[in-house]
Image (cartoon, helix red, strand yellow):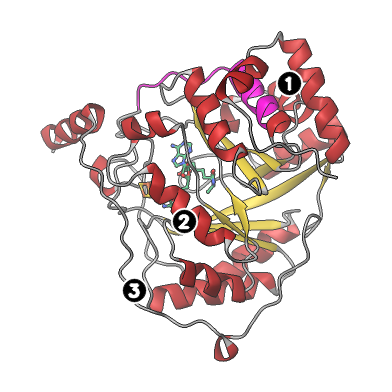
């Protein structure tokens, strides 16, 4: 019988997070080796299939059109480009590809059809395929499932309270609704967040309450350290300390014992010793390749050297769940509905975002 609990409280999670470090590490490592092979780490590759120009105002994100960052925007990639990149990732040891698009939400039409074809193509390469495309309806989630999507990433990012300080163009309930739409299909849920955005430890615990009380819990939880990008309202945030990262990973592992915990953005700032502590504390996945979506990431050869040093092995795909069958487009049960989903647009402004907009205007 599963020992996974779905009733964690904020106080309980804070108590775990604040334990003396050696005790926290020991507890997390004990849970980790009970549910996972401690010497195996999944290697995933990120592909930014549509970059920049996003209408949202997520305060951390270099792809938001309103923040004048130095990233190169791109229209949707072709299926052939995506296939070539996925094959390259597979040959350098990746078992999972995560395709990201700088969209607020998915719209039915040619571009979504093209993404469905990308999903079918990568699934046929025997790799886990994940997408992160913004908000989706249940019908869109079903269409992705039929195309063979293995996972959908949609982060809660922080606690419900702090979320309002970071994003004003959508609400926490919109995020939960998309996660719920994914849950109605056989696609697995990937949802986590970012630390180092100026939130309190209580917000980190609040996010872990929101994730761990989902039933079932997300199969995958990425923990990102903020990459503070010039031009975003968070450009001046101090890098998050490795000790906070280790505590966050360990606490995530303890409250979500079966999930894949992903040591995600921010690894360029971490030493090998720091990352080794994160693996010991229960992280069992990394994103490899010299770029995340738009920001730098360690070189894959450096990562493979680290794996060798630590005796870690890259994980094979489809360990937790069978490979999903791919339904060809002509046999699909689900079609474009062209529905107009009712996503919310909360009625508030974020001072820090307003300042960033003014600064960008003045600079032009
Ligand atoms: N547009 C989609 C959405 O927001 O759901 C998908 C792409 S979005 C870039 C995916 C995730 O990347 C965000 O939810 C956030 O957690 C993470 N992310 C974006 N910018 C980041 C940054 N500067 N540092 C750390 N994580 C970041
Ligand atoms: C996630 O939680 N982290 C990844 C993945 N899911 C899509 C994205 C990190 C993006 C970091 C900023 C950038 O490179 O643009
Ligand atoms: Fe757009 Fe996603 Fe970036 Fe928010 S995180 S601005 S929704 S690309």
Callouts 2 and 1 close, C-beta under 8 Å: no
Q: Which residues are magenta?
A: 235-252
Query: Residue 189 at x, y = what percent?
Result: 60, 53
| 125 sits to left or right of 80 | right
Please give the residue where the numbered disc 3 appears in the rendered image. 339
| 65 sits to left or right of 251 | left
- What whole-number distance in Å separates the C-alpha atoms at marks 2 and 1? 37 Å
Please give the residue where the numbered disc 1 appears in the rendered image. 273
Query: Residue 356 at x, y = what percent?
Result: 22, 31
Q: Earlier in the sequence, mark 2 or mark 1?
A: 2
Q: Tell me the residue at 34%/41% (across/down).
A: 58
Q: Earlier in the sequence, mark 3 or mark 1?
A: 1
Please give the residue where the numbered disc 2 appears in the rendered image. 178
- What whole-number distance in Å separates the C-alpha atoms at marks 3 and 1? 50 Å
Q: Tell me the residue at 73%/29% (across/down).
A: 254
Can I make out residue 225 in this image?
A: no
Query: Residue 10 at x, y = what percent?
Result: 56, 23
Can I make out residue 5 in this image?
A: yes
User: What secondary structure is the stretch in magenta mostly built from?
Assistant: helix
- What whole-number distance in Å separates the C-alpha atoms at marks 3 and 2? 15 Å
Mark 2 vs ligand 1: CB under 8 Å? Answer: no
Residue 99: say if magenta.
Answer: no
Classify 10 Å Cα crowding around label 3: few (below 14), some (14-19), many (20 and above): few
Mark toward the viewer: 3 or 1: 3
**The N terminus sits in image quarter:** top right
* Disc 1 element: helix
Mark toward the viewer: 2 or 1: 2
Q: Earlier in the sequence, mark 3 or mark 2?
A: 2
Q: Nearer the viewer, residue 172 or 96?
A: 172
Callouts 3 and 1 close, C-beta under 8 Å: no
* Disc 3 element: loop
Dividing the picture into quadrants, the one containing residue 22 is top right
């Amino acid at each position: 019988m599963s020992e996974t609990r779905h009733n964690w409280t904020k106080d309980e999670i804070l108590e775990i997070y604040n334990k003396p470090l050696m005790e926290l590490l020991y507890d997390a490592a004990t849970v980790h080796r009970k549910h996972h092979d401690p010497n195996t780490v999944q290697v995933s590759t990120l592909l930014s299939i549509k970059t920049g120009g996003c209408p949202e105002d997520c305060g951390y994100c270099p792809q938001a059109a309103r923040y004048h960052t130095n990233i190169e925007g791109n229209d949707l990639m072709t299926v052939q480009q995506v296939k070539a990149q996925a094959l390259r990732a597979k040959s350098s040891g990746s078992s999972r590809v995560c395709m990201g698009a700088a969209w607020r939400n998915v719209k039915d039409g040619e571009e979504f059809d093209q993404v469905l074809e990308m999903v079918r193509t990568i699934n046929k390469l025997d790799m886990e395929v994940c997408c992160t495309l913004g908000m989706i309806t249940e019908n869109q989630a079903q269409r992705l499932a039929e195309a063979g999507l293995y996972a959908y990433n949609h982060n809660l990012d922080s606690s419900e309270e702090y979320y309002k300080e970071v994003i004003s163009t959508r609400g926490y309930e919109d995020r939960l609704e998309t996660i719920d739409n994914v849950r109605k299909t056989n696609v697995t849920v990937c949802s986590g967040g970012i630390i180092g955005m100026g939130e309190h430890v209580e917000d980190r615990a609040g996010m872990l309450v929101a994730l761990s009380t989902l039933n079932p819990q997300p199969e995958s939880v990425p923990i990102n350290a903020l990459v503070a990008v010039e031009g975003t309202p968070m450009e001046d945030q101090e890098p998050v300390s490795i000790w906070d990262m280790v505590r966050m990973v360990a606490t995530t592992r303890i409250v979500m014992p079966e999930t894949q915990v992903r040591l995600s953005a921010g690894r360029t700032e971490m030493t090998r010793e720091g990352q080794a502590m994160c693996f010991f504390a229960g992280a069992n996945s990394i994103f490899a390749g010299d770029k995340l979506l738009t920001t730098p990431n360690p070189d894959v050869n450096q990562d493979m050297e680290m794996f060798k040093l630590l005796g870690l092995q890259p994980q094979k795909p489809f360990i937790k769940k069978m490979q999903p069958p791919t339904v060809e487009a002509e046999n699909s049960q689900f079609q474009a509905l062209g529905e107009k989903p009712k996503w919310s647009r909360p009625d508030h402004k974020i001072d820090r975002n307003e300042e960033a907009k003014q600064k960008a205007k003045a600079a032009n």
